[in-house]
Image: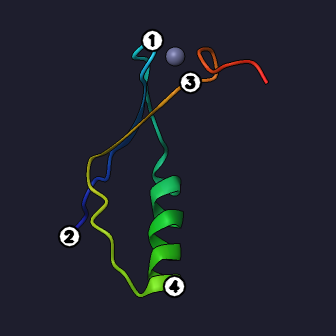
Amino acid sequence: MVVTKICIIVCSECETVQTLSPGYLEEFSRRLQQEFGFIPDLDNITIGGVCSICRPPG
Ligand SMILES: [Zn+2]
């Protein structure tokens, strides 16, 4: 079964939404399994934060 994993990053300042490529999740999942033996449920993840435009200088 192929599961389409969607991971988006959302800026808390300007609410810009960007979609991460599947490679990010695959790498993250692989490391969790290697380091913790943990199989993560990575479907439909939203990561909040501040984008490059809104982040404070420095
Ligand atoms: Zn922003």
CA separation in Å, label 2 and label 4: 22 Å
In the visual, does 2 lie left or right of 36? left
The image's mark for residue 51 is 3
Q: What percent of the width, then of the height, locates residue 32?
A: 46, 75
CA separation in Å, label 4 and label 3: 30 Å
Is residue 24 or residue 10 the one in the foreground?
10
CA separation in Å, label 4 and label 1: 36 Å
Query: Mark 2 vs mark 3: which is more N-terminal?
Result: 2
Query: Mark 2 vs mark 4: which is more N-terminal?
Result: 2
Mark 3 residue type: Cys
Helix, strand or loop at mark 1: loop
**Which mark is in front, 4 or 1?**
1
- Category of crowding for the residue at label 3, using alpha-carbon neighbours closer than 10 angstroms: few (below 14), some (14–19), many (at least 20): some
CA separation in Å, label 2 and label 3: 34 Å
Q: Residue furthest top?
A: 14
Q: Residue furthest right?
A: 58
Residue placed under numbered mark 4 in the picture:
34
Is residue 49 or residue 30 the one in the foreground?
49
Residue placed under numbered mark 2 in the picture:
1
Q: Is residue 7 above or below residue 37?
A: above
Residue placed under numbered mark 1 in the picture:
14
